[in-house]
Image (tube, rainbow, N blue to C red):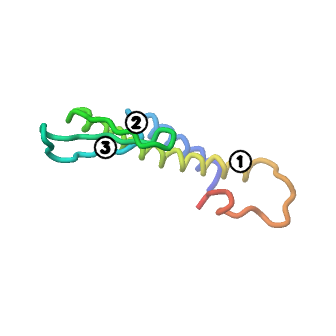
Amino acid sequence: MTAKNRHQKYQTLLQQLSGVGWISEGHAQNRGRGAGGPCFQWTRKVKGKTVSVALSEEQFDALTKAIGNWQKARKILKRMQQLSREEIFTTLPGTKRRKPLGKKVLGLI
């Protein structure tokens, strides 16, 4: 990939990232009907411990979307990192190596 193509792809990813919306980590679950009615729950890890929070249906819907947005943002950021490393290692002078760095070492594949 040429430097120009890399820059264009990076700019496209930046635009996609700016349009992601609200984000949240964790998992939102619809546990079905409970003793008091519908049961919605959000769980996440905090310092290695699972924390659960009861949700209203509206909160559940919003968190489900936010969690999906977080997953989308992570994919975009991963690709941006790959492009950044490719740019850095192909355009800037490096150290002498016996063999060139492979794509796997650079995290490009």
The residue that label 1 is drawn on is: 88
Quarter in which the N terminus is drawn: bottom right
> How far is disc 3 from disc 1 in space, using C-alphas?
38 Å
Q: Which mark is residue 23?
A: 2
Q: Toward the viewer: 10 or 100?
A: 100
Report the side of 22 relative to 96 (left or right): left
Residue 50 lies in quadrant: top left
Relative horizontal placement of residue 11, taking residue 73 as reference (left or right): right
Q: Amino acid at mark 2?
A: Ile
* Side of 44 where 86 appears, left or right: right
Q: Residue at x 53, y 40 (%)?
A: 11
Residue 105 occupies quadrant: bottom right
Q: From this viewpoint, which residue is outermost toward the bottom?
A: 99
**Residue 17 vs residue 15, the one in the foreground:** 17
In the visual, does 106 lie left or right of 57?
right
Identify the residue at image location x=47%, y=38%: 46
Q: Which residue is mark 3?
A: 28
Circle 1: residue type: Ile
